[in-house]
Image: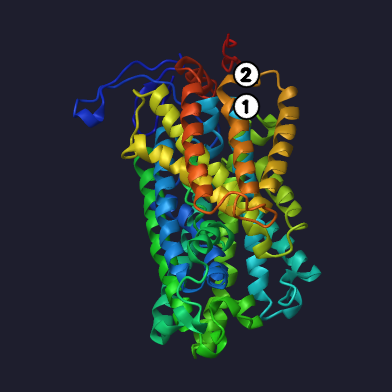
């Protein structure tokens, strides 16, 4: 028996939770026993502010430094609309993660919820994309650091080819090594460092917004005669994933990745997720307004889509501040361009090690990834986060070249949350849910549709690459599981919808309107309708084939014991 540090109730590992009163009906809650997963060796040393700033430092990273420029280059003044739309989308997805993380506060949660709900076959796919999303963020933050640093050290970045140089590559390697070293601190010490960094990271964009609004020029939003939204609805939708807007919002799920180390997770985790997304939405929307409004008119005589000044391309906000007459702000922003991406890279290195820890708890990867030192740090996962991160420095030589693939991996990971919400509501309706997502019967399938649309809007060039990456993931984890005698059963029946979902999305994307490499055979609007209807069908198919209650609880029970001898595989399905 173990004692949960929040509810102070004994939890049995027998596998089945008895019914309990529904809190929404106003009935009194009785103490109940239920199966809950636990984490071995991790320490709960992060409070509400630390949890909020863990997500916020992930949200406010390199995205604000580059995405407003990229969005303006793609869709002009209409970029402001996209930030608001993306904020609403992310808030809906965040509500799913808030319920899941509070219900099962375990580290590497995004890699573990689908495992509990649908078993190992589906869980491997979502788990691998969770790892892919996390391990690629540190390299991209290093790219942002080096790009801005080229102002002082020009040999680091070539603004004409939009690629970092050999010297820049060595700087990124060194920076990633620093991220790894700092993460070897105990969580309470790391948390203090991260809180200080994040206060800075939030303050500087706010200062930039206030100062640049003094140079606001409303005519900039329609400069060059192209209109407010030169690309129309198609341009707006394509820009969400491709401009870096969705990428900029990614990171709110860091609370789920660190849930095993958050104090009072039932209370603090959902609050931290929701607060961090709301702060990020306000800051990002106002940054886009301030950026476009402060651009000197001579820089956009042919419209926002034709900004060519190398200084603006290499360091958008710092250059605009200097051109607007605020040289001091330009220097402050260039300093922040070192701190802001570094803070995000730091926390994503943390998250990557916790996801690999979670994958080890799922028994998808070698158990060495679950090794934790005396400070509660998954040290093997940290080392491999650094090594795998180096791989992504080689084929993607710039910030923009990595964004599309990362967004695709992120959204595929996010799609696992609404599926898990729906499955858990059916499997364990009696489970203790400190936070319940409102209108889940509608919002869960709607979130899944949104995630699929974001994948579709990413375009065929991104989707086929994600397919290749997924195959590699299944091969690697399949090899690892083949040598693990305590591996979970392969729940094929509960994942029968998965290959149909992925193949269907790929076909629609190939035949749809978003490229390059697409055929364009499916007309605009019809393509999105097809994606939406297809997503609804897949969602309810997944609900119909989810794991039975007893088997789902058995998988949870395998992770509820700290004694390996208790982690016996459940009875095979018939």
> Would residue 384 appear left or right of 98 to someone viewing this image?
right
Establish if 330 lies above or below 56.
below
In front: 363, or 541? 541
Q: Which residue is mark 2?
A: 489
In front: 63, or 202? 63
Q: Residue at x 53, y 83 (%)?
A: 320
Q: Which residue is mark 1?
A: 121
Q: Is residue 184 visible?
A: no
Q: Are marks 1 and 2 in contact (CB under 8 Å)?
A: no
Which image quadrant: the N terminus? top left
> Which circle's residue, 1 or 2, is located before the other in the chain?
1
Give coordinates of residue 224: x percent, y percent.
52, 83
Q: Residue at x 51, y 17 (%)?
A: 551
Nearer the camera: disc 1 or disc 2: 1
Q: What is the secondary structure assignment of the residue under circle 1? A: helix
Q: Is residue 548 visible?
A: yes
Give coordinates of residue 357: x percent, y percent.
61, 37
In front: 519, or 461? 519
Give coordinates of residue 413: x percent, y percent.
56, 42
Place residue 339 in its image quadrant. Answer: bottom right
Q: Residue at x 38, y 17 (%)?
A: 17
Which image quadrant: the C terminus? top right
Whole-number angstrom distance, CA of label 1 to CA of label 2: 9 Å
Give coordinates of residue 298: x percent, y percent.
54, 90
Establish if 268 lies above or below 190.
above
Q: Residues within 10 Å of mark 1 (few under 14, many from 20)?
A: many
> Would residue 203 appear left or right of 508 to someone viewing this image?
left
């Amino acid at each position: 028996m173990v004692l949960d540090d929040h509810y102070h109730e004994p939890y049995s590992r027998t596998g089945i939770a008895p019914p309990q009163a529904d809190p929404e009906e106003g009935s009194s809650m009785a103490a109940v026993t239920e199966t809950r997963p636990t984490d071995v060796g991790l320490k709960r040393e992060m409070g509400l502010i630390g949890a909020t700033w863990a997500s916020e430092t992930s949200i406010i990273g390199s995205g604000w430094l580059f995405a407003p420029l990229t969005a303006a280059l793609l869709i002009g003044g209409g970029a402001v609309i996209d930030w608001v739309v993306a904020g609403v989308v992310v808030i809906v997805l965040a509500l799913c993660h808030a319920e899941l993380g509070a219900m099962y506060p375990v580290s590497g949660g995004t890699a573990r919820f689908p495992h509990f709900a649908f078993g190992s076959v589906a869980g491997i796919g979502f788990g691998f994309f969770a790892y892919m999303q996390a391990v690629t963020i540190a390299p991209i933050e290093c790219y942002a650091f080096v790009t801005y640093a080229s102002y002082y050290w020009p040999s680091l970045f070539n603004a004409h080819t939009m690629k970092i140089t050999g010297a820049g590559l060595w700087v990124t390697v060194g920076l990633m090594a620093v991220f790894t070293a700092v993460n070897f601190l105990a969580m309470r010490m790391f948390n203090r460092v991260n809180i200080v960094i994040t206060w800075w990271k939030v303050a500087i964009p706010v200062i930039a917004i206030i100062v640049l609004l003094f140079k606001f020029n409303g005519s900039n939003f329609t400069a060059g005669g192209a209109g407010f939204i030169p690309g129309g609805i198609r341009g707006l939708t394509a820009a969400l994933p491709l401009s870096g807007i969705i990428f900029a919002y990614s990171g709110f799920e860091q609370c789920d990745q660190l849930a095993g180390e958050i104090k009072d997770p039932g209370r603090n985790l959902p609050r931290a997720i929701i607060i961090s997304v709301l702060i990020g939405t306000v800051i990002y929307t106002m940054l886009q307004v301030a950026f476009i409004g402060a651009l000197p008119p001579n820089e956009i005589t042919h419209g926002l889509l034709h900004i060519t000044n190398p200084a603006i391309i290499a360091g958008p906000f710092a250059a605009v501040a200097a051109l607007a007459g605020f040289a001091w702000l330009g220097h402050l922003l260039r300093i922040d361009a070192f701190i802001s991406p570094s803070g995000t890279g730091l926390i994503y290195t943390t998250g990557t090690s916790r996801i690999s820890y979670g994958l080890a708890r799922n028994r998808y990867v070698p158990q060495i990834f679950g090794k934790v030192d005396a400070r509660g740090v998954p040290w093997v996962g940290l080392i491999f986060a650094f090594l795998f991160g180096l791989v992504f420095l080689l084929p993607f030589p710039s910030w923009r070249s990595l964004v599309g693939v990362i967004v695709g991996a992120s959204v595929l990971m996010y799609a696992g949350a609404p599926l898990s919400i729906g499955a858990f509501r059916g499997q364990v309706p009696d489970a203790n849910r400190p936070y319940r997502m409102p209108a889940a019967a509608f919002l869960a399938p709607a979130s899944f549709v949104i995630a699929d649309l974001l994948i579709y809007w990413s375009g065929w060039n991104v989707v086929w690459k994600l397919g290749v990456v997924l195959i590699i993931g299944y091969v690697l984890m399949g090899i690892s599981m083949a040598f693990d005698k305590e591996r979970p059963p392969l729940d094929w029946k509960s994942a029968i919808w998965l290959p149909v979902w992925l193949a269907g999305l790929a076909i629609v994307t190939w035949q749809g309107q978003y490229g390059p490499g697409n055929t364009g055979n499916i007309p605009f609007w019809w393509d999105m309708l097809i994606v939406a209807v297809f997503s609804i069908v897949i969602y309810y198919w997944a609900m119909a084939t989810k794991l039975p209650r007893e088997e789902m609880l058995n998988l949870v029970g395998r992770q509820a014991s700290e004694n390996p001898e208790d982690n016996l595989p459940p009875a095979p399905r018939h």
